[in-house]
Image: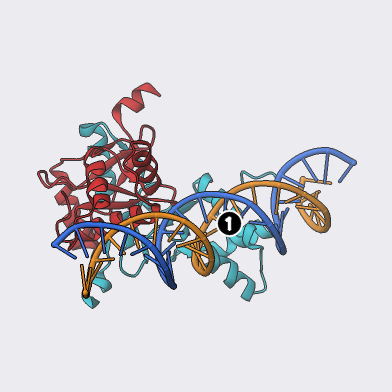
Chain colours: A red, B cyan, C orange, D blue
Amino acid sequence: MVGEKHPYKTRQRQAVSDFLSAHRDRYLSVDDVFGLMRAEGQGVGRTTAYRTLESLATEGCVAKVVAPGGGESRYRLIDPERRDEGQLVCLSCGRAIPLDCEMLPEFYQHVEGEHGFKIDFSRTVLYGLCESCRKGD
Amino acid sequence: MVGEKHPYKTRQRQAVSDFLSAHRDRYLSVDDVFGLMRAEGQGVGRTTAYRTLESLATEGCVAKVVAPGGGESRYRLIDPERRDEGQLVCLSCGRAIPLDCEMLPEFYQHVEGEHGFKIDFSRTVLYGLCESCRKGD
DNA sequence: CTAGTTGCAAAGAGTTTGCATGGCG
DNA sequence: CGCCATGCAAACTCTTTGCAACTAG
């Protein structure tokens, strides 16, 4: 299970963790989690979905970001195996693509050093169009 | 006036444009616009404030940015004179800061050329901690 | 048994929509 | 005059909170 820092291990918390784990390539809204889990017969209350996702985000297991236009928050399990900085999300297909790029820390440090702003990449998403959507559309 | 693509030129639209123009250095919430304009005797309806700001953002004259938790949106007139593409938002104080940085287009082009992903900076916000919050906290 | 967890219902903040009125061209 | 813009009130969306019932340890 993902967030071990909790006193109680409940069915709901386990189920949300498993669900996130099964959808690592997407940022999911609370309603995605609520609705899809219910459809799979692994339902949890909406309030519980909010609380569990929020708590996993605070623990640092989950990246929480806001949708491009505003509106709902979205969550994605952080992969501890990879240096999980830099997430690209395609505005067309919605897929999250990890950006493994040597220029990223450079950019990161430049903004911190020259502009005094420390970017938090677990809260930041670069929105745009992925390669296949640019060709397809 | 800022957004010339509209059939009618109304007092309200003019007033909102002028107001944004007089506060180019700040990101304003709808309530800032609504409240401050009213205080100055240049009031517009709240609905009109929403509609005008949204329309200016769609036209590309105005940058729209959402608060870290997904709270209110904030708007700022884009300065065509500057490389005005990056939007920083502080996770602690919520302040939005324009990023005028020569490295930004470089980074942008690198990600497009080398990683095949075309970042849309009008939809992207970099979240993190601003200078004063890093010192203060 | 005790403290943390759940989930319904209600409250809350921010935003959008329906619709009658008013103003631009 | 026709069409679009305005603005009030109501509806809507997303999220948080109150609270009684439940459950892991």
Image-quadrant location for residue B126: bottom left
A108 relative to C19 in the view: left or right: left
Image-quadrant location for residue A41: top left
Quarter in which the N terminus of chain B is drawn: bottom right
A45 relative to B45 in the view: left or right: left
B82 relative to A101 in the view: left or right: right
Percent position of residue C19, x then y: 77, 49
Q: Secondary structure at mark 1?
A: helix
All told, the count of numbered labels is 1
- Asked if one can make out residue A63 in the rendered structure from this viewpoint, the answer is yes
The local crowd at label 1, few if under 14, some if 14 to 19, many if 20 or more residues have their Cα within 10 Å, is some
Residue sitting at x 30%, y 45%: A126
Residue sitting at x 37%, y 22%: A136
The residue nearer to you, when weighing A3 against B104, is A3
Residue highlighted by disc 1: B50
Residue sitting at x 58%, y 59%: B17
Percent position of residue A91, x then y: 38, 37
The residue nearer to you, when weighing B93 against B5, is B93
Quarter in which the C terminus of chain B is drawn: bottom left
The residue nearer to you, when weighing B66 against A116, is B66
Amino acid type shown at disc 1? Tyr
- Asked if one can make out residue B79 in the rendered structure from this viewpoint, the answer is no
